[in-house]
Image (cartoon, coloured by chain):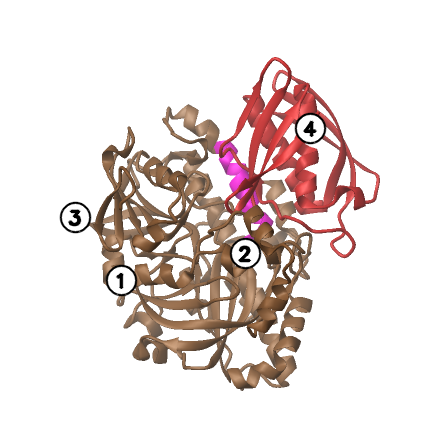
Chain colours: A brown, B red
Amino acid sequence: MTIEGLHRIDSTRLEVPKGYKPGMRTNGIIYVDEVLEKELEKDSIEQVANVATLQGIVGSSIAMPDIHTGYGFSIGGVAAFDLKEGIISPGGVGYDINCGVRLLRTNLEKVDVIPKIKELIENFYRDIPTGVGSKGKLRLNADEHRKVLVQGARWAVEQGFGEKEDLQHTESHGCIEGADPDLISDKAYERGRSQLGTLGSGNHFTEIQYVDEIYDEAVANALGLFNRQITVMIHTGSRGFGHQVCTDFLEIMQKAVHKYNINLPDRELACAPFESPEARDYLASMRAAANFAWANRQFIMHWVKESFMNIFRTGPGTIGMGLIYDVAHNIAKIEEHTVKGQKRKLVVHRKGATRSFPPGHPELPEAYKHMGQPVIIPGDMGRASFVLIGTERGMQESFGSTCHGAGRLMSRHQAIKRAKGRAIWREMEDKGIIVRSAGRATLAEEMPEAYKDVENVVDVVHHAGLSRKVARLRPLGVIKG
Amino acid sequence: MKKYEQLDISGDAGLKIWGETLEGLFANAAEGMSELITDVAEVEGTEEREVVLTADSNEDLLIQWLNELIFFFDTYDFIGKRFDISLKNNMLKAKISGGRHNPAINESRLLIKAATYHGLSLKRDNLQWEAVVIFDI
């Protein structure tokens, strides 16, 4: 039975009709099948409806199948706004600006790595600062910090942390134009100074995986993926730097809401008209934080490669290590989309949603242009992660967006209660997964049952045609904050 | 009287906080948040910090206050243990004494990104002040 007030359009889409709550300018679309519908939170539906009340929204207020309640916008939310009539909202991006994922390939197989997995994970844990209070090994002076904000991953590569090709295989080439380091608060500089090249805590991780299923042989081949192959996934964002930028601008936006007389159903939706100075400043600062995040993942990838080289006593070329792709899943971007037959520039907010551009899109690197953009979907630490590929249908229906992960199912307390008396690390080891974690509670909070099954989430976007499944990756070892 | 209690929120952390005075509530909120981050009793040191903040309302001031403390922790590892607070006309002045969290020795609980406006409330009944704050973690 469909939730009261909602309307099932087809097997993968629920509509939140325009009349669901007063003030909605458009409808909401939630991509869930009947299985995931049962896990929908009332508050998250309310948030999809709230976003539909914002001025200048174009198309529907969209949510992906990994939807859960966030601040202002739901996690899994996608919303596009007109550049003249519309707004930009930090709540549509989130506190962890450019939280994202990158996936590395190797030419090693599962059998090569299993005997060395403990050693590799210990190396990761030693070389990648992880967890609450951990500090980065890099100490930036003021000039270098500004360069990171303007150049992103490009700066890291110039310092010898990676290859030029890595930038080709990163969304926005690891550097989004238009960042302005002069707009960043002293606090954000101070908070970010020792956090570049750190993993963080919570759901962030670095994981060694193997390919256990290929769904699309041609695309997998083109990405260099094959059965039983070892891959490495890195999930982190802009750390305290991005959190401070968001905190600073939420305060500014609260004032903008009064100044521009904007009526909001929820304070966390605080926003400013896109053409206002407040919006311009936020966009330029958010871009700086996004670049910080791309540099962060680039540095961490370098230490991952070093660990492999140390353990296998060889160069990165010999074991075929290279970046497949890096995606942002908390970001706002100006993009061109076709709406009702007309090409328009829009500001697309993706909060817990991944860009998923189709074949032929001009922003894709040459190597991937014929097949579409690779999409990296991290799962929980016990089950699986996925590689998908962008589609034309996704471009038309969801502003070239798809899901971003498993989505939480249990609260922290529920998870801790459920894990009481259990040794989660031992359960994982019994499944053949080595886990190293900095925080005592993190493992319980992050145990697989605390999340929706990512396979269900990915199946919905696959069947809805927003992106297509390419490969499934199983975990072998992971470090977590 | 109970100072605070932790709230169970899907994926995140929250606090319900009480205080006989508004100043007391602000101090209890800070104490409750420090406990979300680490076991405060274990943190050694006698460092002092001073803060002056202004906002349009007491609610906003509470969020700014907690975000200031999150900044101190995330930047300097500073954990407040005692809070001497005065509040007047939406201006907060605080003296904080505390110490530095050392991840090698002290317990690491949650990495708090920010105190949010989500579900924020601050009210007074006849007897006491009560607030709800939700944190992004």
Q: Nearer the viewer, mark 2 or mark 4?
A: 4
Task: Answer above or below: position of A163 versus B73.
Answer: below
Q: Amino acid at mark 1?
A: His
Q: Amino acid at mark 2?
A: Asn
Q: Nearer the viewer, mark 2 or mark 3?
A: 2
Report helix, strand or loop for mark 1. Answer: helix
Where in the figure is residue A211, as x and y percent of width and height?
44, 77
Q: Chain of mark 3?
A: A
The magenta stretch is A237-252
Residue for point 68% across, 33% down: B30
Q: CA distance from mark 2 to mark 3?
A: 39 Å
Report helix, strand or loop for mark 2. Answer: loop
Tag 2 residue: A203
Structural crowding at the residue carrying mark 1, measured as other residues with C-alpha within 10 Å and reported as few (<14), some (14–19) or many (≥20): some
Residue for point 56% across, 52% down: A415
Tag 1 residue: A463
Q: Nearer the viewer, mark 4 or mark 1?
A: 4
Structural crowding at the residue carrying mark 2, measured as other residues with C-alpha within 10 Å and reported as few (<14), some (14–19) or many (≥20): some
Q: CA distance from mark 2 to mark 4?
A: 32 Å
Q: Earlier in the sequence, mark 3 or mark 1?
A: 3
Task: Answer above or below: position of B31 versus A396.
Answer: above
Q: Quadrant of residue A120?
A: bottom right
Q: Is residue B74 left or right of residue A274?
A: right
Q: Nearer the viewer, mark 3 or mark 4?
A: 4
Tag 3 residue: A340
Q: CA distance from mark 2 to mark 1?
A: 27 Å
Tag 4 residue: B2
